[in-house]
Amino acid sequence: NGMQGIFQIGGLIVITVASGAATLLWVKLSNTFGPDVDVKDTVVFLSMVVAFPIGLSYMTLFDTVGDTILFCWAVQQRRYNYQRDRCWQKPAAVGFVSSYFATADPEMGDVANVNYAPPALRELVLGRHRKLSLFSCPGGAGEL
């Protein structure tokens, strides 16, 4: 939550200031409000006041989506670990031959194919810093 909170506050500041800067540029170039500087400053200030709740709602939504993606990854990891442990422990109860030549349960294939979170998130969380191009070529040439 630490880095995401900093990003959320920074995004809110950028959205508010960018709105004020765009309004200031528009007011100066269009000369809509005449030569009165106080009116122009009021318009810029009001645009920033309107942009603040819009930016707050957008960054709150961003925070919620980020938390949801991390939660999905955690659920996926817990489910996979539970199924893996359960499937590898099953053959030991069947008999000596099964425990000596332990193989995974066929159900494990179904679990391995379920992805709740994007693969890029898994790579990031596990510390594998691979950069992938947007358009991967056949034969594995998509890595940069």
Image (cartoon, rainbow, N blue to C red):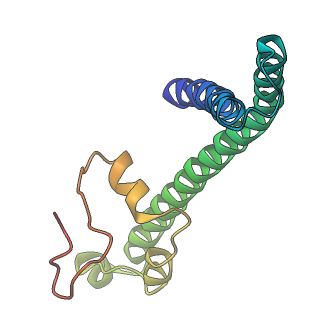
Above or below: residue 15 compared with residue 67: above
The mark total stands at 0
Residue drawn where x is 35% and y is 49% of the image: 124
- Which one is nearer the viewer's eye here, 24 or 16? 24
Image-based side of 44 in relation to 97, left or right:
right
Image quadrant where residue 96 sits: bottom left
> Quick one: quadrant of the N terminus?
top right
Q: Residue furthest top?
A: 38
Image-based side of 7 in relation to 17, left or right:
left
Image-based side of 110 in relation to 25, left or right:
left
> Quick one: quadrant of the C terminus?
bottom left
Residue drawn where x is 56% and y is 66% of the image: 116
Above or below: residue 22 compared with residue 45: below
Image-based side of 48 in relation to 139, left or right:
right
Residue drawn where x is 21% and y is 83% of the image: 137
Above or below: residue 119 compared with residue 27: below
Q: Residue furthest front?
A: 35
Residue 100, horizontal then vertical, whole percent:
23, 77
- Which one is nearer the viewer's eye here, 98 or 32? 32
Residue 125, horizontal then vertical, whole percent:
38, 46
Residue 136, horizontal then vertical, whole percent:
26, 78
Above or below: residue 4 compared with residue 66: above
